[in-house]
């Protein structure tokens, strides 16, 4: 990361804390690593991101339906998916300061790319050969313990009433898509869908990431938005190309700049995958994966068929054929999307020799749509009038009432949370029944009659 | 439960499975106890419930802001809250079939009410005195192991990279409100709020309930909607009365019958509580808690102040006084609300000598708002026209397209998922550009011109 980019990241993190978007978790207790809490504006932004995804992916698609499977599933799910045996990171510990590091990442940093299929002996050999080159990021020493594999699935004792929770652990889901696969047949039987169709889900997942970092980009508790699309084998690649096109357009519609987006093609595919691309976004720390769009073949339903004994064969009566549906998926994190939207919106402008920080969210994403101010807080007639304006708008828009400090300071605060319109009730309002509406981006102020305000805003928000 | 009520419960559970509202979890693996998955219509209903709550509790209240704290928090949170030491159920095991039972519930069933403050020795004595009267619900034997306390907090190894997950467990939150308390100061510092103000949150919580039961009423993984309102000590009881009024009205607006709602006053208050009422709803298994509306005094912030060393004193400049804010709360489960809405909606009617099952959801709660049918699926001109109607409505309403089977059958299916309006494109449509719109409740059909359909629906949905 260049100095400038690292500064930008710091500025975004600081604004998020200061302005109630995102707080470090459990801060009063010294923090809890790799987990974040969304504050009043963060939760609205998160909600806008999820609602936009749901509308585009579920509501507007005739053959996509939603699902909300629980975080906890039968442990066999994770055997079938391969997570119990394979979802492990190579890990070693600094002998001096006991910091744990991801061996594959440490090797990458010295230019060596360990193959995912390497076993522990091979990785240990690679580390031994490069002794002295791998340096502890914390204390700069070079002595490490032997490499071990650490499974990323998070264990728990839900439903386990013995004293020992190591015994028969149940897992917090490591990805939401497994909840979709295990419910595939239920959905097929109860909703009006036929292959090809999609099941979409938004929900939390958990991974014991050894090195969680980059703010909300990689956290141990995170939320995914996943579309799993069940398709006939012979249509997989055509529908995959269509899905890729749709997903690219989705991000443009979300308001991300096309110049900050790019496709990354996976070179080393897992054995069952047909093709895998990621959509990358240019975060302050460089282009990184935002969404994975993958053609997964019949692996998922075949595995669950094998482990559950359920027959997942689909009979296509129209074309008189039978097959195990293949899966194409589009999978993205809520946190990553929020971070992309925050990065895109963050703007510094010179205004009258001062720096104005403004979050230029699209109207759709803006956490607060309209702020209402009485010019002065110690004038009851202004406060009362401003409250009545707030009351008239609140059921349609997320509004904020603010009577604190001078109006200039209130504008700056609303700019930093990205509110598109600020409405001020002043002394003239009491005479002419009109208010001053200030535009966040142009900073222009117009006078709007109160009885025209609803229509004026409606038009602006439907632009 | 009377036979009739138990039948009603069975009917609701069966409809939920058959029609894609709620599935047993991990069914293909034989199920996972005390957890449920929401299908295509369940997830929409759940979303309608949450959106309604958020709009009424957050958006329409000038001094309530939202929050989305993580499921995982610093373990000290649960020491401060009292959960680590006190959140435990008395438990014993049948010596014959090893079924575990809640001792307090077993005692209640024979008319003995164990005080919450009783220690283990006292409870064991009580059980000993009633030997022979307590019968295993499974095998009907009367020999049990000694009573133990089992903590309901669910443990996990998130962020723990040792092999043993009993070592320094971190907890999945047992209630969402703790995330609000630990962020109280962050919100106060970053959002434009002053006491009295509320923080509202929707999110999952987890409890190792020994006897989870009654479908989605009591589950080990569940979702809460909680409002924590921070108030001046001397205004606590007035604001509490106001909150109680608001919450009662909320349920009427949600569409629950007033005759099926009642207040239940807690007689045995925990030591710090000022007053506690529950709103009960008449579920098929009787009146049970839907929501708790409690006046909690200064317990929560005082405890977190003690354990974190943070000073939670609030300085009210207007009235020139300082205090630890008191908390009044309104706490309800998403699953319980969904079950109440399902119970309220479930209707059987005699129509032409047959029983019609119809879910009479309010328009706001209905998972699908409009269904669009071509009269026949093998007539391309009808299918194409119907698809264009679907396309014209989909961005405004959750719609469903159905061309399967005869129209009567499609109506019955839409009745069972509670769709307010079904639109049929028939041969006349190709001539007169009008469609048949059928009303779910009255079953009346009217002919609406396609160019008037948007307005017609808008009016119906804003009624």
Image (cartoon, coloured by chain):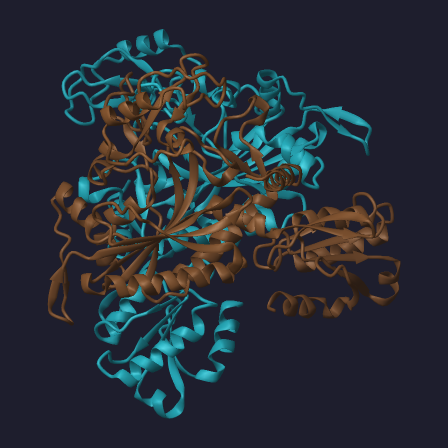
Chain colours: A brown, B cyan
Vertically, is A427 above or below A29? below
Q: In the drawing, does residue A146 fall left or right of residue A202?
A: left
Vertically, is A447 above or below B248? below
Residue at left 17%, top 15%?
B95
- Percent across and percent down for residue B155 are 37, 24
Q: In the drawing, does residue B121 fall left or right of residue B457?
A: left
Depth check: give the residue in front, B31 or B144.
B31
Q: Quadrant of the N terminus of chain B?
A: top left
**Could you tell me if residue A225 is visible in this image?**
yes
- Percent across and percent down for residue A399 are 66, 53
Q: In the drawing, does residue B460 fall left or right of residue A350?
A: left
Residue at left 74%, top 54%?
A372
Q: Quadrant of residue B190?
A: top right
- Percent across and percent down for residue B237 are 65, 32
Depth check: give the residue in front, A365 or B149.
A365
Depth check: give the residue in front, B77 or A414.
A414
Q: Quadrant of residue B366?
A: bottom left
Vertically, is A54 above or below B170? below
- Percent across and percent down for residue A449 are 78, 68
């Amino acid at each position: 990361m260049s100095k400038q980019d690292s500064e930008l990241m710091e500025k975004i993190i600081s604004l998020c804390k200061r302005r109630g978007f995102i707080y470090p978790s459990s801060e009063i207790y010294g923090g809890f690593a790799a987990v974040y809490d969304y504050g009043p504006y963060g939760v609205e932004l998160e909600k806008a991101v999820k609602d936009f995804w749901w509308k585009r992916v579920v509501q507007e698609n005739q053959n996509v339906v939603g699902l909300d499977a629980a975080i906890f599933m039968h442990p066999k799910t994770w055997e079938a998916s391969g997570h119990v045996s394979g979802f492990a990171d190579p890990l070693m510990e600094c002998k001096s300061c006991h910091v744990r590091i991801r061996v594959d990442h440490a090797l990458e940093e010295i230019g060596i790319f360990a193959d995912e299929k390497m076993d522990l002996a091979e990785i240990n050999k690679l580390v031994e050969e490069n002794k002295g080159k791998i340096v502890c990021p914390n204390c700069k020493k070079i002595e490490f313990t032997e490499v071990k594999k650490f499974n990323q699935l998070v264990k728990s004792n839900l439903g386990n009433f013995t004293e020992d929770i190591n015994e028969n652990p149940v897992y917090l889901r490591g990805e939401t898509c497994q909840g979709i696969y295990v419910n595939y047949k239920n959905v097929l039987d109860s909703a009006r869908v036929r292959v090809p169709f999609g099941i979409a889900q938004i929900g939390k997942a958990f991974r014991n990431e050894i090195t969680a970092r980059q703010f909300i980009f990689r956290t141990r508790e995170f939320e995914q938005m996943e579309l799993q699309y069940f398709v006939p084998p012979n249509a997989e690649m055509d529908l995959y190309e269509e899905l890729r096109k749709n997903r690219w357009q989705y991000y443009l519609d979300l308001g991300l700049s096309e110049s900050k987006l790019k496709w990354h093609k996976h070179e080393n595919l897992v054995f069952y995958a047909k093709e895998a691309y990621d959509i990358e976004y240019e975060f302050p720390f460089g282009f990184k994966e935002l969404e994975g769009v993958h053609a997964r073949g019949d692996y998922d339903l075949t595995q669950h068929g094998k482990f559950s004994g359920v027959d997942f064969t689909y009979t296509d009566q129209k074309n008189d054929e039978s097959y195990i549906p293949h899966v194409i998926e589009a999978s993205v994190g809520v946190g990553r999307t929020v971070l992309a939207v925050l990065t895109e919106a963050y703007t510094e402008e010179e205004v009258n020799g001062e720096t104005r920080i403004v979050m230029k969210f699209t109207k759709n994403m803006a956490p607060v749509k309209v702020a209402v101010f009485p010019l002065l807080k110690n004038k009851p007639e202004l406060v009362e009038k401003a409250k009545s304006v707030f009351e008239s708008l609140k059921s349609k828009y997320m509004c904020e009432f603010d009577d604190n400090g001078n109006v200039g300071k209130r504008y700056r605060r609303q700019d930093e949370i990205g509110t598109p319109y600020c409405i001020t009730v002043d002394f003239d309002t009491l005479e002419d029944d009109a208010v001053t509406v200030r535009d966040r981006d142009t900073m222009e102020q117009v006078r709007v009659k109160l009885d025209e305000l609803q229509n004026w805003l409606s038009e602006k928000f439907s632009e």
